[in-house]
Image: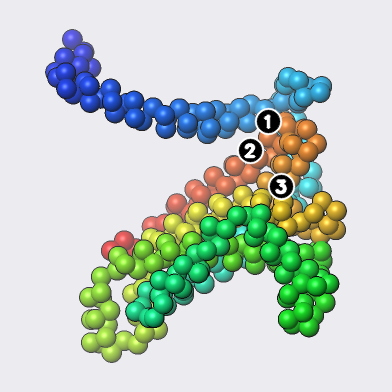
């Protein structure tokens, strides 16, 4: 008698019913993961080795041709550079601002709940609405920013400025979400540490750098890792803020936008799949490096 058969015979009728109902409740989620996540991943990898047939019918296996074209062409690396430049703006600035806001709004101040709500509002705004508002603010002729500062800057049409403008929108959009995560991390820090520091005469700044920052490192690591992955997948801001006729599009075009252009606009889904799989490999490498560095600077109390 096998071990599985022995366990099956030992299960009572009530336990079997419980197992069946548990599987029934989990099955929709499992089916959703398979249909919406796992199958598209494997099909995309398969399609990256193919050329879409004539009129979009069928796939013709061409081996590594798509990957060779992607990795030897300058468009992919230019888009990757644009994506990294966006991440350099969004990730550190949103993280630092969110940490400062969380520390400030963790204190007992008037209208604290209202301030938290205001800073979190960008997360619940529709991306299309966000893009429309910021396009109006950035407008060179009648935009609020140029009228307010008395400048004549082409915020989203100057290739030297556009990528910074997109990065600012990214920081504004995500800082509230990061702030909420930091607030939850601050709630987990025992107040005894700060009371002992006050007795020892430590100033607020020293308490921040020697107590708050080290004990928030698990939350910081989580935000850093997820925001790097999210920033490298940026698409919606570029797609909605930048028009196809915009001369600065090439300076802000992200890797995912490049994938969209080839896969859905040009109809070359094999080449587009190779782009997104190459980006997936890069993200996996970055994630692996971050996981390896976790033990060196993340402290769990």
Q: How many marks?
A: 3
Crowd class of label 2 (few under 14; some 14 to 19; many from 20; radius 10 Å): some
CA gap between label 1 and label 2 equals 8 Å
Question: x%, y% of residue 248?
Answer: 81, 59
Compared to residue 281, the image places residue 102 above or below, namely: below
Left or right placement of residue 293 versus residue 64 in this view: left
**Residue beneath the point at 41% across and 77% down:** 111
Determine contact: label 1, label 2, CB under 8 Å.
Answer: yes
Which residue is under mark 3?
257
Q: Residue at x 27, y 82 (%)?
A: 197
Instruction: Please tell me whether residue 278 is drawn above or below residue 228 in the rendered image.
Output: above
| SS for callout 3 | helix
Q: How would you rate the neighbour count of disc 3 (Cα within 10 Å): few for under 14, some for 14-19, many for 20 or more?
A: many
Image x and y of residue 72, in percent: 77, 42
Count neighbours of disc 1 (C-alpha within 10 A) and say few if under 14, some if 14 to 19, many if 20 or more.
many
**Quadrant of residue 249 in the image?**
bottom right
Q: Quadrant of residue 40?
A: top right
Residue drawn at x 72%, y 21% as measured from the top left:
59
Which residue matches tag 2? 277
Left or right: 286 with respect to 254? left
Q: Earlier in the sequence, mark 3 or mark 2?
A: 3
Give SS at disc 2.
helix
The numbered mark, 1 or 2, whose residue comes first in the sequence reads 1
Which residue is denoted by mark 1 in the rendering?
48
Q: Nearer the viewer, residue 280 or 100?
A: 100
Give the CA distance from mark 3 to mark 2: 14 Å
């Amino acid at each position: 008698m096998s071990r599985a058969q022995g366990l099956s015979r030992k299960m009572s009728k009530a336990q079997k019913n419980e197992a069946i109902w548990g599987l029934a409740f989990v099955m929709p989620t499992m089916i959703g993961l398979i249909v919406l996540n796992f199958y598209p991943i494997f099909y995309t990898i398969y399609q990256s080795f193919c050329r879409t047939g004539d009129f979009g019918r069928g796939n013709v296996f061409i081996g590594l041709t798509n990957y060779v074209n992607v990795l030897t062409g300058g468009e992919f690396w230019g888009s990757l550079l644009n994506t990294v430049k966006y991440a350099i703006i969004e990730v550190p600035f949103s993280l630092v601002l969110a940490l400062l806001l969380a520390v400030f709004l963790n204190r007992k101040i008037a209208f604290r709940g209202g301030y938290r709500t205001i800073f979190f509002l960008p997360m619940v705004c529709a991306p299309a609405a966000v893009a429309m508002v910021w396009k109006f603010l950035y407008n060179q002729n009648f935009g609020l920013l140029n009228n307010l500062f008395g400048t004549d800057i082409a915020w989203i049409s100057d290739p030297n400025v556009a990528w910074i403008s997109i990065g600012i929108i990214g920081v504004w959009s995500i800082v509230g979400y990061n702030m909420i995560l930091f607030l939850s991390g601050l709630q987990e820090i025992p107040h005894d540490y700060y009371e002992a520091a006050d007795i020892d005469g430590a100033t607020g700044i020293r308490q921040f750098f020697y107590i708050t920052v080290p004990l928030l490192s698990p939350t910081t690591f989580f935000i850093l890792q997820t925001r790097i992955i999210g920033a490298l997948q940026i698409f919606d801001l570029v797609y909605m803020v930048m028009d196809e006729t915009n001369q600065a599009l090439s300076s802000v075009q992200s890797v995912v936008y490049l994938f969209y252009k080839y896969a859905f606009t040009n109809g070359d889904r094999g080449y587009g799949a190779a782009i997104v799989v190459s980006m997936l490999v890069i993200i996996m490498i970055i994630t692996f490096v971050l996981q390896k560095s976790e033990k060196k600077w993340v402290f769990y109390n």
